[in-house]
Amino acid sequence: MIRRSLPIFFAAALVFGFIWTLIFLYRKSVAAPVIYQTATVTRGDVIEKTIAPGAIVPRREVAIKPRVSGVVEHLFVVPGDYIKAGAEIAKIKIIPNVVTLNASEARLATAKINLASSQKQYERFKRLSGMQLVDQSEFIRSELEFNLAKQEVADADSNLQLVREGAERGTAKVSNVVTSTVEGTVLEVPIREGSSVIESNTFNEGTTVASVADMNDMLFQGHVDESEVGALSRGMVTTVTVGALRKERFTGRLEYISPKGTDKDGAIEFEVRAAIELKPGAFLRANYGANADIILDRRDNVPLLRESLVTFDHGQPYVEVEVSPQVFERRSVVLGLSDGFNVEIVSGLNANDHIKVIDSRTSAQKPAP
C-alpha cells in the first residue's frame, strides 16, 4: 500500500511545485505599485536676498608720510597702538644733499661777510652821528643795513641747520619727526629702523611710514554681480557674517553702490559698501573676510511650498494635487517671492491640499506567497 502511494505523493508534490513556481514568477513579473509621498502648504517668512563677498575695512584709513627724505632713526609706535593726533611716529635721520649743503654753507659765509661789513659801517656812522658830522638819515640807513645783515645771517644759519638735521636751532619746528595727522589705531608700520624713506611732495607720493585708522567706524566693502545690482538701493538692510568670528552677525545698511562696474574673470561686478553697526564690546579687525546678505524683498507669514515641487509648462507653474488616495490632478498656481528653497503661493492651493512629491516615491512590495 505504501509503495503504491509513493509515486502518487511524488507526482502531487511535483505538480504543486510547478504551480507554485508559476505563481511566484507571475507575481514577480507584475510591477509593484508606486506610492507617492505628499507635502502640504505651510506658513512662514520668505526672504529674497543676494550674497556679496568682501571684507571689513575702516571708513577712513590715513597713510602717514614723512616731510623729509633720509633714514629712519627710531620708531615710536607698533601696529595696534592707539595714538592721538600729533603723536610722534618716527624720527628721520637726514642725509643732506651735497649740492644743497654746499649752497647753504656758502650762503651763510656770504651773509657773515656782509654782516661784518655792515657792522663796521654802522659803527663808523654811529661815531660820526655822535659828533654831529653826519646826516641822521644816513645813520638810520646804516643801522637798517646792519640789522638786515644780522637777519640774513640768522636765516642762513637756520637754513643750514634744517639741511643738516631737519630742525631749526632754538625753535620747536622739527621736520625730521613724523607725527600723526589723525587719531586712531596704528594698523601697519611697513618700514623698519634703518630703512630709507622719501619725502612726500608734488612730484613724489612719498614713503608710507604708518597707516592709522578709526576702528570704531567700520564698513563692509564687497562686490555684487551686474544681474543683481539693479535691485539694490541705498538704505537696504544687510546682515554681515565675518568668517573669523563664525557665529557673530552684524547689521549694516547699504550706503554706496558703484556707478561703474569692473571686469573680473569675464563677469562685470559692482562695488558696494555698507556701514556696520558694532555691538558693545565687539572689535573687528581690518580686512576680515566677510559676506553680506543684502535683503532685496521679504514676505512675512505667507503660504509657502518647496520650490522643487513646482513644475513649469511653457513658463506656467503647476503642481499635482491629491484628489483621492494616490490619485493626482494637475493644478495651476500663482507664485510670489522665492528664496531659492521655498516659494510663496499667491493663489491656487489651500492649506489642506496634499501635493505630490515627485522625487520621493516608494514601491509597495507585495508579501511573498
Image (spheres, grey):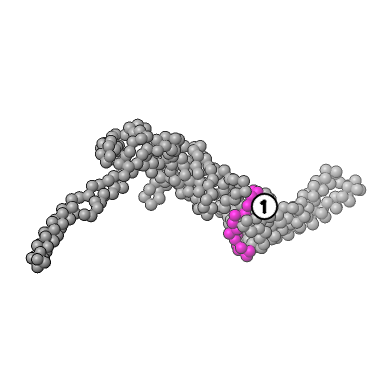
> Residue 64: x and y, percent?
61, 53
Instruction: Inspect this view and state whether residue 203 appears.
Output: no
Q: Amino acid at mark 1?
A: Ile
Residue at the image point whose x is 50% and y is 42% from the top: 238
Q: Is residue 272 magenta?
A: no
Instruction: Inspect this view and state whether residue 278 appears.
Output: yes
State which quarter of the image contains the C terminus. bottom left
Position of residue 143 relative to residue 107, above or below, is above
Residue at the image point whose x is 59% and y is 54% from the top: 187
Outermost front residue: 1
Q: Which residues are magenta?
A: 182-197
Figure quadrant of residue 95: bottom right
Position of residue 174 relative to residue 271, above or below, is below
State which quarter of the image contains the N terminus. bottom left
> Residue 259: x and y, percent?
45, 40
Q: Which residue is mark 1?
A: 83
Tell me the crowding category of disc 1: few under 14, some 14 to 19, or many 20 or more residues within 10 angstroms, Cα based.
some
SS for callout 1: strand
Closer to the camera, 196 or 334? 334
Residue at the image point whose x is 64% and y is 50% from the top: 184
Q: Judge from the rendering whether residue 302 lies leftward or rightward of residue 73; answer left or right.
A: left
